[in-house]
Image (spheres, coloured by chain):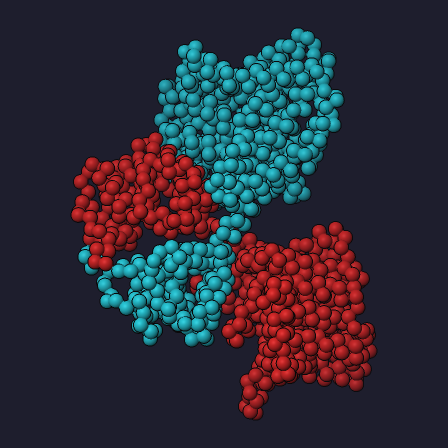
Chain colours: A red, B cyan
Amino acid sequence: MPPIARYLPILDWGRRYDRDTLSDDLIAAVIVTIMLIPQSLAYALLAGMPPEAGLYASIAPIMLYAIFGTSRALAVGPVAVVSLMTAAALGQIAQQGTIGYATAALTLAALSGVILLAMGLFRLGFLANFLSHPVIAGFITASGVIIAVGQLRHVLGIAGGGDNLIELVESLLRNLPDTNFHTLALGASATAFLFWVRRGLKPMLRRAGLGPRMADIFAKAGPVAAVVATTLVVWGFDLANRGVAIVGEVPQSLPPLTLPDFSPDLIGQLFLPALLISVIGFVESISVAQTLAAKKRERVKPDQELIGLGAANLGAAFSGGFPVTGGFSRSVVNFDAGARTPAAGAFTAVGLAIAALALTPLIHFLPKATLAATIIVAVLSLVDFTILTRAWAYSKADFLAVLTTILVTLGFGVELGVSSGVAISILLYLFRTSRPHIAEVGRIPGTEHFRNILRHKVETDPGTVSLRVDESLYFANARFLEDYILDRVTRDKAIRNVILQCTAVNEIDMSALESLEAINTRLGEMGLSLHLSEVKGPVMDRLKQSHFLDVLTGRVFLSQHEAVLATMQRGASASPLDTTPEPRQAQG
Amino acid sequence: MPPIARYLPILDWGRRYDRDTLSDDLIAAVIVTIMLIPQSLAYALLAGMPPEAGLYASIAPIMLYAIFGTSRALAVGPVAVVSLMTAAALGQIAQQGTIGYATAALTLAALSGVILLAMGLFRLGFLANFLSHPVIAGFITASGVIIAVGQLRHVLGIAGGGDNLIELVESLLRNLPDTNFHTLALGASATAFLFWVRRGLKPMLRRAGLGPRMADIFAKAGPVAAVVATTLVVWGFDLANRGVAIVGEVPQSLPPLTLPDFSPDLIGQLFLPALLISVIGFVESISVAQTLAAKKRERVKPDQELIGLGAANLGAAFSGGFPVTGGFSRSVVNFDAGARTPAAGAFTAVGLAIAALALTPLIHFLPKATLAATIIVAVLSLVDFTILTRAWAYSKADFLAVLTTILVTLGFGVELGVSSGVAISILLYLFRTSRPHIAEVGRIPGTEHFRNILRHKVETDPGTVSLRVDESLYFANARFLEDYILDRVTRDKAIRNVILQCTAVNEIDMSALESLEAINTRLGEMGLSLHLSEVKGPVMDRLKQSHFLDVLTGRVFLSQHEAVLATMQRGASASPLDTTPEPRQAQG
């Protein structure tokens, strides 16, 4: 592979492109295009953008991802959670519907693109790992609830809004008396229909003899039917004049060339939201891409994915869009419809460009309630509160992280929700490792095995205490170890030797080294010796670079058994360990 | 011990108080009082407070610490680094010398008191562990430089100021032409004298036959001599009228009863600085207390120390002071002078109260340059840039943390400096554990030992890959493991079994569990089996609560040896491991 191909995967698959692949990709593109039209409009509504922005955000980004991305099936464009985060971020800057709002959306997409590109070029994809699975699951569930509740106002035909559940519910209740019943009838029917499509249509189609893939694709096309039907109803019964909110005038145009506002103030305000949107979008996208790639035993490259998504967002920024990422449902449809290369995405972009040029007059009478209905039905499939019970059953720390994420997201909005989830996961991890499990060990009689004296019947020597620390030693637990050992030896005046068994110590950082030095000095002042046993190679290499081994009051032993034998001989008392030492693995 | 005594250590030592202890404590108190008078005035100057505030900050706090603290020798009051942090925090709120500044100082002390008390009551002392030793060392060194450079203006008799090194140097250079040469003569002499006291006086006294302790105490009383001499010079030559800045009018009074301003705005602005001051103060204090306690084989209780320091700061807040903590030099003097109980502190407080009532007229002509000189000489002993070379030699990650802390502190001030030090330590730790060492292991011929195939001559079976992960599995490295294993098996088509040797896995959190499930599923789809070996007890308990073991494509083996034998029998190929299995520890 030429070096440039590392950053341009298109050079790799493009050279092997043939007629068969072309026809598969074209079929997939047609199906995905039909599905994407209502979805793009809906997510534009969710992001607070004009409907055409949803189409624009699906055209250039898909094209750019096709050139730079590594997934064969990923379909890039506006997605629910990122659109919600976009609305939350922009709501602090400007009013929906203003020029300022649309320009800030471009800036947000541009920032997100730059952040993703930088993460890809500097191989910082690992940063996404700090979003733990439970935090993501909790965040998506809470976001789904916020999105669904937020869209209810479009189904009811009332005003209102808010960034968190409390504001949304309060605004819904306050405006409930203004409900427009034409809108409600349309919205409720569309919602019910879409639920039925999702739950009832697929089994029906299967029974009618359709394959599972085709049944699924048809079911995913349900929103198109809802869009067509409700648009006709609004047009036929002139409901737009009876208070039903419609999409209205949409420009007939290819995506325009737009320039984000790069004023330092705006960048300052949008940087953190852009970072969160980038990371959340990347995590969502990479999960979908990896799942689909694994089905064909392919691999996606996370760092190159960052570059692909970064390019897609920059594309959105300069073509009238808003932040985008790889979407789950559309990617699955793309995959199931037989897409074989990113070219399928490029053809989808062409299809959407045609739609933006030619079809926009047809959606003039499309009621916003229908779009809201497609959003509600789509996001409710993301809502899964069982993550709480699963986390509770598995680990209380994970449960606490999920619960915090859900509650803060619902109560204070998406940005604080995801930030607090990350923060609490990290704090809980540091907290756990800051109080490591320390086992006092003794020898299992007749063996060279040393086990926890609380769990096994073992022999120990009263003059020696052997401690196995089940954690790397680093700043967060260095002082704990100091306290633990000094407490242990001040409680028991018979102790002359302390052996630290370092089997599970993968690292000793400088703080821990200073604590070990302090322990060594204080034990020395009390007339005790500190020994180490079974120190791992890399840790020992590191210790040799310090002066710790020179001042160590005791010795470093290769095995715990040797350490105990040696300290026993130092101590005068007759010990229960006084048996003939047996060479390890004598039978080998 | 009655339960109440846990929170009131005074009930413990107070009952056993006798005449001998009293006389020892009284002597120590007299010595410490003499030493504390110039120190308190100096640190008040550093904190931007009026001189009497330094005395007040040493009276009630010492009393309260005597009741609630556990250290027998710790002397509480204003200290250099905390005073610097106080000035930095208050400088953002109000101008030095205004009522607003002094009131904000009370609020800062009160907040710090509440934070320390809360940390003590909720046993959150472990939070201080996140300040790694190298970060603290770097922070103190950089703070020492900032303090010393900041005090130069008092030695030169010029105006100016600043929160970081750049501002301070720039302001010094700009105001240099205004140097007052009377002030400079006084300040330079005092500085030179104090350096000589520190370096030359102590050896001289030793040679004159004084014991090392007494020599040290006399040397520490040097500032008192400088204060007396320069005050007399200023008074005798009427230098106050020649531009030498003096302490001036100081009220003759016991500490006043003061009320901090608890407006939410002020609390919001001061919360973060108060948190940093609390943690830094606690870390400083506990290190001193533990060092001194260890010399007498005593222990201090970190949680109770938090309560003691919290009470001391609340005391400062309600008696005209500013944030305080346990000071290093005064505690060492207290210890060396023979203090045996916290009562020595109480007597010191009485001594200082008498000074505040009776001696303040005597310091009217004390030049500020002398106070600046005592500060400069005191803090330069804290400056130790060798932490950089030591960290570089031991660990590049620790070096990066120290360097960041020093540079950010010097360049952007104390708050950002210590915050960035903590943040970068945590990030670097997470980064290291996010790419754990994974060793591919094979059997050492003739044994049941499995070692890294890159480091040892070992036997392996082509159909099986055994991986030992040298780290707990958690959210930050879950996806790394997923990538690593899937990359490994897609590279080598002969593999039928993957064994994860879990010797060093102290934890598997929910994210890692989901990654293991994903690995298991994907390996299963490729026709491969995933096995685990040597899973620790607590980890296994946890796994049993999930459904992972039900869906595992392979098995869980007690030892790596058993795992290899079993998978070898599954694989058809004749393998180099095909020897008779020997029961482990047959000789036992």
Residue in the picture at 73% in, 59% down: A107
Residue A406 falls left or right of residue B528? right
Q: Position of residue B182 (x, y in %)?
A: 69, 14
Residue in the picture at 26% in, 37% down: A494
Q: Quadrant of the N terminus of chain A?
A: bottom right
Which is nearer the eye, B60 or A567? A567
Q: Specify whether residue B104 is in view.
A: no
Residue B21 vertical placement versus A120 (above, below): above
Residue A151's quadrant in the figure? Answer: bottom right
Residue B578 vertical placement versus A488 (above, below): below
Q: Position of residue A512 (x, y in %)?
A: 43, 42
Residue B22's quadrant in the figure? Answer: top left
Residue in the picture at 61% in, 15% down: B189
Q: Position of residue A4 (x, y in %)?
A: 63, 64
Residue at the extreme front of the image, as rendered: A2
Residue B263 falls left or right of residue B312? right
Residue in the picture at 58% in, 82% down: A216
Residue at the extreme top of the image, as rendered: B236
Residue B81 vertical placement versus B246 (above, below): below
